[in-house]
Image: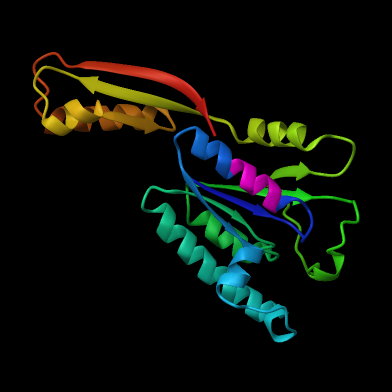
Amino acid sequence: MIYWLIGQPGSGKSTLARRLKEKLDSNNTPAIHLDGDDLRKIFEVPYTKENLTKEYRITQTKALQRFVAHIADQGINVVVSTVNPYKDIREEFKNSRKDIKEIYVTTDEVRGREHFHVKDFEMPKMNYIVIITHGKRKEDDTFEIFCSLLRRKVYVTTITADKCDDFCKAAGNVKTFDSLEEKEEWVKAELATKNYGEYPSVYVEEKEVI
């Protein structure tokens, strides 16, 4: 999965992203966190007039999108926290992926980073999870609300049988799906191509995960 948190500097997206990575790691679903400030340091991109133009931001965002897609396609969770200000660039990437959750993080509080705000930031209008980080709510409570909005149902299928290759026996042949239809298609294909014996056992468990 790709979890992409967008918003103006100082909105709280990096804090939420770091905590999300920690939670995913603790749930045995490790993640990589890519933060805008860290990426600037790694690639030595200073805050200059030339590096803050719309054209430059678009070029850098598209490059980051390709990098994120490359990591995610290898089965690794990616948590991204960047400003990502332009709607068309965000939507183009979103429409090319089925494994992305986008989160808009915003605040009305003054936090000392307002001079870094992107003046032409384009607000998301739909299909975004929105997290407001100002107010009297504690950080832990905000994070719990954040997690509750990310949770989704998945269907975990396990096939076991006497006749099963060594990999199947070692791994338990466990597969996770986002829908029962996807699960049924995989089970039919799996049973048709592998020799599990005459009466394989198929176990399905519904879980809620982030």
Relative image position of residue 206 (x, y in whole percent) = 44, 20
The residue lying at 58 percent from left, 73 percent from top is: 60
Q: Could you tell me if residue 39 is visible in this image?
A: yes
Q: Is residue 22 above or below residue 105?
A: above
Q: Is residue 19 above or below residue 204?
A: below
The residue lying at 11 percent from left, 17 percent from top is: 162
Q: Nearer the viewer, residue 98 or 136?
A: 136
Judged left or right of residue 56, residue 77 is left
The residue lying at 78 percent from left, 53 percent from top is: 11
Q: Is residue 88 above or below residue 137?
A: below
Q: Nearer the viewer, residue 72 or 192?
A: 72
Tally of marks: 0
Q: Could you tell me if residue 128 is visible in this image?
A: no
Magenta region, residue range: 14-20
Relative image position of residue 84 (x, y in whole percent) = 66, 63
Q: Is residue 204 magenta?
A: no
Quarter of the figure with the C terminus: top right
The residue lying at 56 percent from left, 75 percent from top is: 43
